[in-house]
Image: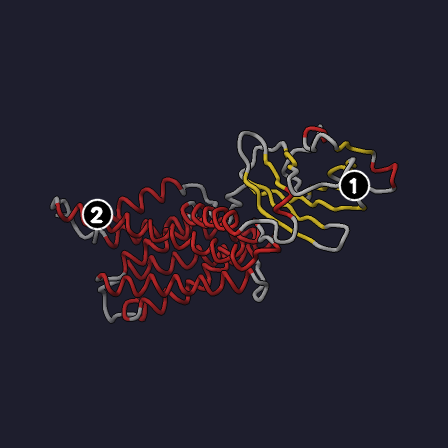
Amino acid sequence: MRAAWACGILACGLTGASPVLAHDVDVTSVARVFLDEIEEGRYLLSVVDAKVPRITDPRAVLPARCTPVAAEDIGIRVLSGFVFECETPLEAGDVLTLPWSLAGVVVLARWADGSAGSGYFRGGRGVVPVALGDLRANGASLFRVAGTYLRLGTEHILLGIDHLLFVLGLMLLVRGFVPLVKTITAFTLAHSVTLAASALGYIPIHRAPIEAAIALSIVLLAREIVVAGRGPAHLTHRKPWLVAFVFGLLHGLGFAGALGDIGLPESAIPSALLFFNLGVEAGQLAFVLVLLLVHRLLLATKRLQLPKLDPFLGYALGALATMWFFDRLPSIWGA
């Protein structure tokens, strides 16, 4: 069909040669941390992710006026983390510097006055700075939330090889610009619905079967690409937008699982969810536009005088997704 699609699928296949898919991977390397205010001036910092190294030098984490104390002395058992005291209570301008080479950390704070807050903090240069002002009620500015979650959504979709391959499959299957726009729009609306519903707690997330089902959706789409034009037209060929919508609901659950790893700030859940979704859509749109541009350039240079490539691309897409599907099956029984 289109040599541009060949370039796209080869690029995706090479970068996604590992049997692990981006929806299945915590692409932002997120760790979870709890900050509890035991009483005024005394705090417990606990880490609930066994994958991150133990903090060996708490003083390097804390503001200068804070010092670690022995948890046993105040009757607290700490499995992973430490207790610390500050000469004056932590303030909005204070920063905790976590010594981890991670892309980000989710911090959930519970304050002595009964309020709570959470946020995602990006890392860099071997540390993750946690601005405590963003953990107070209404502490994170809309601008910061928008920038953080827009970037996270874009990163997730552009690293989501399985999702991009499904979009590529839709572009291989659908003929004509208007039907393609209709199909991609249906897919977008569907995964936006389930992303929002899952992130807000209306739909439970079971990652292992969802990830296996996403891989299987690519296999089924690849089959439709291969059999296109052979015999009576299937529903996928007659109404691709409908099939895209159904599978989009499934892919939205995959996005919601990734967003669940990152977490949403308590004081800005609607805006964080909105901008994460906008980031996903921006990344998807960029992917589609790049493939359309390459296709147009190849048409202009008359380099598409090639045998029909659709079946070959369908087989390649299906083989890659089948490998991913069978790699995911054990995780279902192990969940």
* In the displayed structure image, the side of residue 120 where residue 277 appears, left or right: left
Count neighbours of disc 2 (C-alpha within 10 A) and say few if under 14, some if 14 to 19, many if 20 or more: many
Visible in this render: residue 23?
no
In the image, residue 248 sits, relative to residue 70, either above or below, namely: below
* x and y percentages locating residue 195 in the rendered image: 49, 60
In the rendered image, the vertical position of residue 288 relative to residue 127, given as above or below: below
- Image quadrant occupied by the N terminus: bottom left
Please provide percent x and percent y for residue 106. 61, 45
Instruction: State whether residue 256 appears in this view.
Output: yes
The quarter of the image holding the C terminus is bottom right
Residue for badge 1: 41
Please name which of the two marks, 2 or 1, marks the residue nearer to the observer: 1
Give coordinates of residue 254: x percent, y percent: 49, 56
Residue type, label 1: Gly
> Which residue type does callout 2 highlight?
Ala
Mark carried by residue 3: 2
Towards the viewer: 230 or 83: 83
Residue in the picture at 45% in, 64% down:
249
**Upstream in sequence: badge 2 or badge 1:** 2
Q: Position of residue 37 (x, y in %)?
A: 76, 46
